[in-house]
Amino acid sequence: MTPDKCVHAVNGVKYFEYVLGSDDFKKRVAASKFSKMKNFAKTGKGHLVFQGDHGKVAFRNMKVREINTAKR
């Protein structure tokens, strides 16, 4: 696993995975609603955002921690 590999899972169900900056990732972004956002997924650090598009959404017990990516 690399720092650029992302996996999206909800309640233990994996929906998709990708490698940031890969040709496949760029192709997916180009075909998405984010294609017009010049800096979408191009910065290494920033804000964490939670989104709910379709009705009521609730978040609880959210925990964020830094992951040490140094090789052991």
Image: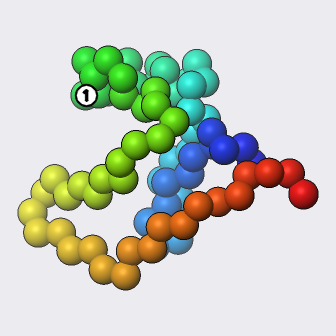
- Tell me how the rendering is colored: rainbow
Residue at the spot of label 1: 33
Residue sitting at x 29%, y 57%: 50
* Residue 54 percent location from the top left of the image: 13, 57
Is 72 left, or right, of 64 in this rendering?
right
Q: Secondary structure at mark 1?
A: loop
- Quarter-of-image position of residue 30: top left
Q: Nearer the viewer, residue 17 or 64?
A: 64
Query: In the figure, 64 relative to 39: above or below?
Result: below
- Residue drawn at 20 percent across, 58 percent down: 52
Q: Is residue 18 above or below residue 40?
A: below
For disc 1, the neighbor class at 10 Å (few under 14, some 14 to 19, many from 20) is few
Quadrant of image for the C terminus = bottom right
Residue 65 picture quarter: bottom right
The residue furthest left is 55
- Residue at left offset 60%, top offset 24%: 22
Tag count in the figure?
1
In the shown orientation, is residue 51 left or right of residue 42? Answer: left
With respect to residue 32, does 62 lie above or below?
below
Farthest-out residue, right: 72
Residue 15 coordinates in the image, percent (x, y): 48, 53
Between 68 and 57, which is closer to the camera in this rendering? 68
Q: Report whether 17 appears left or right of 11.
A: right
Q: Residue 36, how many percent across, how many down?
A: 25, 18
Instruction: Tell me which amino acid carries mark 1.
Output: Lys
Q: Nearer the viewer, residue 11 or 41?
A: 41
Please say whether residue 17 is visible from this viewpoint: yes
Task: Give how far across and how far down residue 9 sits, in percent.
Answer: 49, 61
